[in-house]
Amino acid sequence: MVSKLAGLIVALCAGSCAVASSPSFPQPGKPIRILVGVAAGGGTDITARLVAEKLQALAGVPVVVENRPGASMMLAAAETARSAPDGHTLLYTPDSALTQAPHVHDSVPYNPMKSFTPISLGAVGSVVLVAHESLGVNTVKEFVSYAKAHPRTLTYASAGIGTAFHIYGEMLNRQAGLDMEHIPYKGAGDVGKDLLAGRIQAMFAAGSGALQFTKTGKVKMLGVAAPRRNDLLPGVPTLAEQGYRDFDIDTWLGWLGPAHMPPEIVDKLHRMFAQILAESDIRKRFREAAYEAQASTPAEMASLLQASYDRWGSLIRQVRPAK
């Protein structure tokens, strides 16, 4: 009898201790910070703020988007990796910071596979080669011909060293035998201003930026770097269709937290993101920014991160871009 009672007490204690130690999320009154590695105004920032508004309503606490542009989008990732794994600091990032920059930079303040907890995919998009209208080109072939006719005078910009925009530029240099000069910027906002002004001639841009640029009439979309045409960018052929290989990787935006987040918190956030990204108004607004809203399970996000990291690593080793 005594032994049975003792066993019951132990079981009850274990149960109560488990309840007591279960993480409380969200913590009442404590804001959720969404760190974004780009400046305000671009597609990543816009979609982050759309989700933040919905997340605030679901979580019942303030949700704040904080921009950390610079260092090839690594500043936001590094700050997230240093944060407490309580669900109140989240990273919303283009894949560049996790799958490309670590292969290019000698010193990266985090391990993309160990410093984060994958939560959900956020969106899928495309990268587009665009050129200033003053070049008078309409296709990638015409752009390459122009570049060869004007050696060492053409510049292309990117949102930072080690981003997809940079890597694709170096891939085109290599495959087409060009000598375009790379001009890195801290974010898409600044590079857009210089592109529209004609101070730089070309860039690989996110689909959202490409759409904004072309609406001015000063920039033309020449080719989509994706496995297939993007119906959000009508009439723009892929680079593969125009004879250039390996420009076939979907770009994505993902939700992650610091390493060692409790599974209960990860599950709760994942379910919130899945609900938000399925809403018709969110899907419509994402499409206006040239993104497809898309959630995933944490396991699917982890698999995508690993696969993207491996694929980009292989391409970057072939291209060996300047740092």
Image (cartoon, rainbow, N blue to C red):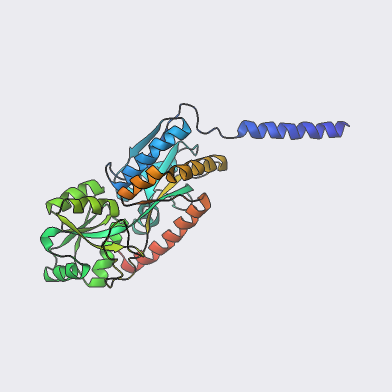
Residue toward you, 242 or 96: 242
The quarter in which the C terminus is drawn is bottom left
Which residue is located at x 44 percent, y 52 percent?
112
Q: Position of residue 167 (x, y in %)?
A: 30, 61
The quarter in which the N terminus is drawn is top right
Using the rendered image of the protein, determine whether residue 323 is visible from the camera's viewpoint: no
Q: Position of residue 207 (x, y in %)?
A: 29, 54
Residue toward you, 123 or 201: 123
Which residue is located at x 38 percent, y 43 percent?
282
Looking at the image, residue 289 sits to the left or right of residue 256; the answer is left
Looking at the image, residue 108 sits to the left or right of residue 151; the answer is right
Q: Residue furthest front?
A: 280
Which residue is located at x 48 percent, y 41 percent?
272
Q: Position of residue 262 (x, y in %)?
A: 55, 41
Which residue is located at x 32 percent, y 63 percent?
229
Q: Is residue 282 above or below residue 213?
A: above
Looking at the image, residue 133 sits to the left or right of residue 237; the answer is left
The total of numbered circles placed on residues is 0
Q: Is residue 231 above or below residue 80?
A: below
Q: Residue furthest right?
A: 1
Q: Position of residue 209 (x, y in %)?
A: 25, 51
Using the rendered image of the protein, determine whether residue 190 is visible from the camera's viewpoint: yes
